[in-house]
Image (cartoon, helix red, strand yellow):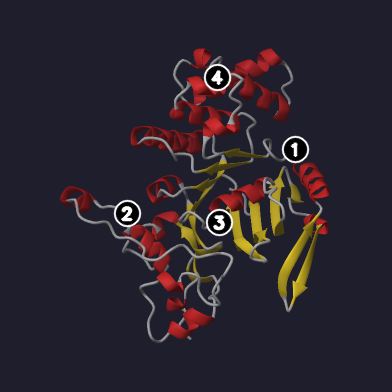
Amino acid sequence: MTTGPILKIEDLRTYFYSRSKQAFNRAVDGVSLALKKGETLGIVGESGSGKSVTALSVMGLVTAEPGIITGNIGLKTNGVQKNLLQDIDDYVKLTRDNARSVAVAKDNPRWQRHVDKVMRGVRGKEISMIFQNPKVSMNPFSSVGRQIREAIMLNTSINNRKEARERALYWLEHVKIDSPRLRYDNNPYGLSGGMCQRVMIAMALSSEPSVLIADEPTTGLDATIQSKIVSLLGELKSTVGVTTLLISHDIDVIKTLSDRVAVMYGGKVLESGPSKEILSAGQHETHPYTAALLASIPTARQIREKSYLQAIKGDVIDTVNLPQGCRFYARCRQVTKQIKMQCKHQEPELREISHNHKVRCWLYFDE
């Protein structure tokens, strides 16, 4: 691995303005992550935590109007450093009233042209993405082989159709799809969900990207197919060595495939560090939210005895009306009298409690 990160996200903020509420939905609110060459960083959290919006922001696919992205997304490939958000704020104007944003004007045509210019040669080539629903992400009227071939010709130096076809077949074989030469001519509607996901993985890897983003790659698949896709991703990690940003609700998937993990809630990273350490329940100190997520996973005994599962009480935080203090405070069951006022009124920083293990919680910094 190189010493510096290949992808470095700094203070990323992705907001969507609600005209009815005259306020921002802070989907991603100050996220910083780093990804080294060859490693897999897993992002886990409930729906609405900001996981997918973080990925879409990296890909330059946040186009909802009016929406705002600020921060830095540094990509270092072939010794060249790029900021994928450079000058993006030139196309947005905020109107404030007593330090509160009450309106936003966004020059969407120029914004989109700027994003397309910056992401040209990056999206699909240096950074590829596997989306949640593979069938929706593919053209239903074109064969899967043709779509992979077009991706290869668009994002690599191969411009010969015959050579691109052979390369597409190579990747279909590599992701272990059955009868790849037959499936090459199938349209997406003629394939199962698991086959479509394999095709999406082949398409994403066909350009040999520097970074692969996998957004819920096992969602919507039955348990058997999920297991096969996880095994495939694990094998590709060891053989291809692609640098991966993996997003999933499934903690076992994150634990199996990831070197490091970031736990997100309410648009913030609440905990980050080595995945095996953080996701091993009861062995190490963890954030109360991480502990609650781990406790909600059914154990073999619970399944055998058909007992009730543990749930995290309350609802996921509203990212329009954010509290002053810790975002997990209203649902936390580990708050003590000593830190109650801090938790309620002051948001903790993300600070290191052991080597490469950071937590955003007053329990570990009682001052």
Let me know if residue 31 appears in the view: no
Earlier in the chain: of badge 3 and badge 1, it is 3
Q: How far apart are marks 1 and 2 (CA)?
A: 41 Å
Q: In this view, does 89 lie above or below 175?
A: below
Query: Could you tell me the amino acid type at mark 2?
Result: Ile
Q: In this view, does 100 lie above or below 16?
A: below
Query: Could you tell me the amino acid type at mark 3?
Result: Gly
As drawn, the label of residue 37 is none
Q: Which of 42 and 87 is in front in this view?
A: 87
Q: Identify the residue position indicated by label 4 in the image.
A: 187
Residue name at image x 59 percent, y 18 percent? 143
Earlier in the chain: of badge 4 and badge 3, it is 3
Give the SS element for disc 2.
loop
> Which label sits in the foreground, 1 or 4?
4
Q: How far apart are marks 4 and 3 (CA)?
A: 33 Å
Give the SS element for disc 3.
loop
Q: Identify the residue position indicated by label 2 in the image.
A: 297
Q: Residue furthest left?
A: 305
- CA neighbours of label 4 inside 10 A, class few (<14), some (14 to 19), many (20+): many
Q: Identify the residue position indicated by label 1 in the image.
A: 121
- Residue 81 point in image, percent of width and height: 75, 50
Give the SS element for disc 1.
loop
Is the C-beta separation of discs 1 and 4 under 8 Å? no
Residue name at image x 33 percent, y 57 percent? 296
> Which label sits in the foreground, 3 or 1?
3
Answer left or right for 248 relative to 144: left
Q: Identify the residue position indicated by label 3 in the image.
A: 50
Q: How far apart are marks 1 and 4 (CA)?
A: 27 Å
